[in-house]
Amino acid sequence: MDEVMKTAADAGADIVKNPEDTFYGGYAGYFRDPNGHVWEVVWNPDLIPTDS
């Protein structure tokens, strides 16, 4: 996820909030693209599919 945020910044996005651990056990950050849209990048290990 840090790579996604770095890629966004390198492409001209403004990092609104650096990624950090969240209260729900995930990891999240926000950036604003050059058109002004705000994006949330999230990773939550509890949502990883398991093999059945």
Image: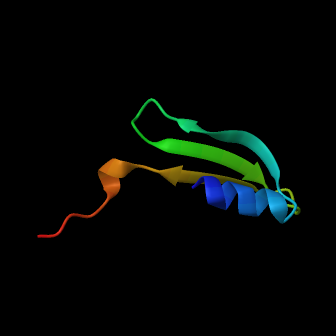
Q: Residue at x 51, y 35 (%)?
A: 21
To which quarter of the image does residue 39 belong?
Answer: bottom right
Q: Please tell me in which quadrant of the rendered image residue 19 appears.
A: top right
Residue 29 place in picture, x, y as percent: 63, 45
Q: Residue at x 85, y 56 (%)?
A: 36
| Image spot of residue 27 (x, y percent) | 50, 43
The residue nearer to you, when weighing 15 against 32, is 15
Residue name at image x 27 percent, y 64 percent: 49
Vertical placement of 19 versus 40: above or below?
above
Q: The C terminus appears in which quarter of the rendering?
A: bottom left
Residue at the image point whose x is 83% and y is 62% from the top: 10
Q: As drawn, is 15 to the left or to the right of 4?
A: right
The figure's colour scheme reads rainbow
Name the spot of residue 7 as percent of width and height, x first: 73, 63
Q: Is residue 22 above or below residue 36?
A: above
Give the residue at the far top of this rendering.
23
How many numbered discs, if any? 0
- Image quarter (top left, top right, bottom left or bottom right) of the N terminus: bottom right
Residue farthest bottom in this picture: 52
Is 46 located above or below residue 18 in the figure? below
In the displayed structure, 52 sits above or below 33; it is below
